[in-house]
Image: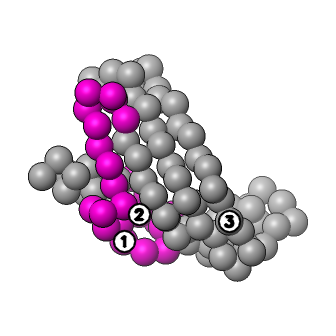
Amino acid sequence: MLQKIFKEILKRVLGEFLAEELDVDQLEVSLSDQKLTLNTLKINVDKLNAICSSMDLPLRLTKCVVGHFECHIPNLQRVPSEGYDVTIADVGVD
């Protein structure tokens, strides 16, 4: 149940950056550790390429996969004011 709630929140926040809709099997939520983990995310390269182009970066991606995305949220009630730590690993690009 908790995973479905976070899936919908993440869909609104990250949806335009993802090439495929999130599956709850990709999502791990641990409130006791204050951690949210996503695995094997296929990234929308058209969106990334548009951002790179708008910043005049000479970069053109054809494929991008993030193997591991972890977000540590120290205080769920104060996310906008306190922020959060993000770790991204196992990134593959073509």
Which of the 4 image quadrants contains residue 23?
bottom left
Q: Is residue 67 visible?
A: yes
The boundaries of the magenta stretch are: 12-35
- Label 1 sits on what residue type? Glu
Percent across and percent down for residue 94 are: 74, 75
Q: Which residue is mark 1?
A: 21
Q: Which residue is mark 3?
A: 92
Q: Could you tell whether 40 is left or right of 61 in the image?
A: left
Mark 3 or mark 1: name the one nearer the start of the chain.
Answer: 1
Q: Give the Cα separation between the discs numbered 3 and 2.
A: 19 Å
Identity of the residue furthest to the bottom in this view: 62
Q: Is residue 50 visible?
A: no
Say if mark 1 contacts mark 2, CB within 8 Å: yes
Secondary structure, mark 2, is: helix
- Label 3 sits on what residue type? Gly
Mark 1 or mark 2: name the one nearer the start of the chain.
Answer: 2
